[in-house]
Amino acid sequence: MDPSQDMDAVGDVLVEDGTIAAVGAGAGAAKAASGATAIEARGLVVSPGLIDMHVHLREPGREDEETIESGTRAAVAGGFTAVASMPNTNPPTEGEEGVKFVLAKACDAGLARVHPVTAATQGLKGEMLAEIGSAIRAGAVAVSDDGRPVANSDLMRRALEYTSMLGKPVISHSEDPALAGRGVVNEGKVSTLLGLRGIPNESEDIAVARDISLARLTSARLHIAHISTARSLELVIEAKRLGLKVTCEATPHHFTLTDEAVRNYDTNAKMKPPLRAEQDVSALRHALAAGLIDAIASDHAPHSIEEKDQEFDAAPFGIVGLETSLGLALTELCHKGGLALLDLIRLMSTNPARILGLPSGTLKVGAPADITVFDPECEWTVDAAKLVSKSHNTPFSGWQLRGKAVTVIVNGRLLMRDGEVLA
Amino acid sequence: MKFERSDLLGLEDLAREDIEAILQTADTFVEISERPIKKVPVLRGLTVVNLFFEPSTRTRTSFELAEKRLSADMVNIAASTSATVKGETLKDTARNLEAMSIDMLVVRHSASGAAHFLAGALACPVVNAGDGAHEHPTQGLLDLYTVKQKVGRFDGLRVGIVGDILHSRVARSNIWGFSKLGAKVTVCGPATLIPPGVETMGVAVSHDIDDLIPELDILMILRIQTERLNQCFFPSLREYAELFGIDSRRMARAKKDVIVMHPGPLNRGVEITPEVADGPNSVILDQVKYGVAVRMAVLYLLSGGETTRETAD
């Protein structure tokens, strides 16, 4: 299945020298006879390699939680051939040097590809522009301060303007920091019952509205990260209708869980933006079904047990997601929600590649041989303890999912076969 | 009857019968507190730790007296002297206490959910002595007990809780407690200090104390913390007193036998004037007095005691 060429057919994919050499019925027949490695995929879906465009790999700085090696291994285990890494490491991914460090580590690991997202402002401090140009020349695919939203609207305007000249998107963690304040959960019934400080939907809505206004002012490309509210979605949909270059992503946890998941003070349900109310979850699902959301990204955020196993206020935001993303999307959106597999692949491969300007995300002849083979029917149970990632902070442990990646090929190299990571 | 609960974390979790059992058991301990020798051997040989991460005089002293009158061996740990100032996590603090074979933990913490967290980490019973803005169940129980003593019934009572509902664990515990026993609760305060969605807890909301006060059988006044001023929840203490403070002028419009309650400590002249705090309708010191007996009942029941009054002696 390849949404980039509207292909949904039974056939072969022939890979030669790291690129796709032929696709279609009988495409591999001649080569199979001449001794090429054959991978049987009967009953499975062969898809352009899945791309998670929003992950935190923690290296450098918190190698106890994740490294580029362990994170890209978890990516392969979850069916991803590539990830975009967020810059909020310590030190941050910034400028040429920061980007080269990430790329070199990813190359050493030899697992999933890593496309670095580079800092928008120096030290992610929201004060001065970072060296965005050198970073992009060194291989960064997008610009973002991610978890540290740029509060200064003038600086955000400059970041958008400057980045637009380089043809890359700015990824915005859209949040009004003052309105979100020291909140730890969605503001509403649950925050009131638990006596926890709330984060109102409007802290996101206001920031999304501002960022879209600035995208209009600058004609720049804006990508809204982890959209979580019904109103933010309306704003993005309106921006698209106006022809602005605005895209957005949703995470599996935001389209699966509501803030009720926090009722027992489970810090593995603490994330930013917070899990929202039922009407927001339902709006996300509708928008995903209608093709109004561009991408599914996990916001994979590894945290140590020591940090998560604390009072709710003290625990950090975020959960791991690389290894549950595909299973949750298949289970919740396709099996339960009726989303077509081709549309799911668009959300998890074709569109992320398009937004980030990658040559992958397609099975067209000549494209890099990044391929994911998944079994949409395989039933399995999430076990936090068995995750490949160095961290195990997931609220989905014990969940029964239907659908799992089986085989992963990156640049023609077989990295996972029959569900086992090989490298 | 055996009390089925292993922890007391909040009144939200308790059934009406649980609350009634605790209130009934407290009767016995009120009587004990009035004896010349105020001590029974109910918890002899058991170790109770009072772990207080927030300053508290009234609650800590009340628990301490309750434990001493039950003959427990008790230890007070205050945050300033505990290892948390050296960076020890709450989890490790709990594990260390457990390693010392404690039998019960009473905890006060500024983080909502801290008592739940410790209850999950420890095998021994945990009593929540106030967690953030979440619950303060023993305060709720002693408030219920005071009303039981003074009015004798709950069904149909009109209860007004006035002040900073948003940050108040006392408000939450009392909302659950009074509602479960059949009273009708209205919360009243500045719009900035009413938590969103509080109606889902089954209460009515008012911003006009003058409108509400004639309706009430119980007037519970909460402490206004002056630090809320700097967080822009209201413009000045003077204006707060003008809009929501309870003085004799407002009391003149209340029912003659209205009961005035306050969990303390008082900001005299802000949320309550001295004439009202010390006036004939005030039961503020009764609340404190009954607090000891109610906490004795809670500790006794959680240690495995029977809920009938005969066996409590």
Image (cartoon, rainbow, N blue to C red):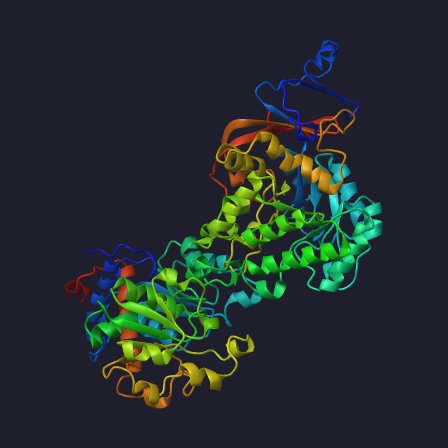
Q: Position of residue A262 (x, y in %)?
A: 47, 53
Residue B3 higher or lower than A139, as above or below? below
Q: In this view, does B211 lie to the left or right of A353?
A: left
Residue A198 higher or lower than A85, as above or below? below
Q: Position of residue A369 (x, y in %)?
A: 74, 27
Q: Position of residue A280 (x, y in %)?
A: 51, 50
Which is more toward the observer, A98 or B227?
A: B227
Which is more toward the observer, B221 or A421?
A: B221
Residue B129 higher or lower than B257, as above or below? above
Q: Where is residue A295 in the image (x, y as percent from the top left)?
A: 64, 41
* Whether residue A122 is visible: no
Residue lying farthest to the top in this orientation: A33
Q: Is residue B227 left or right of residue B38?
A: right
Q: Quadrant of the C terminus of chain B?
A: bottom left
How many marks the image carries: the answer is 0
Residue lying farthest to the left in this orientation: B310
Residue A128 higher or lower than A402, as above or below? below
Q: Quadrant of the N terminus of chain B?
A: bottom left
* Whether residue B83 is visible: yes
Residue A290: quadrant of the picture: top right
The residue under the point 39% across, 65% down is B135
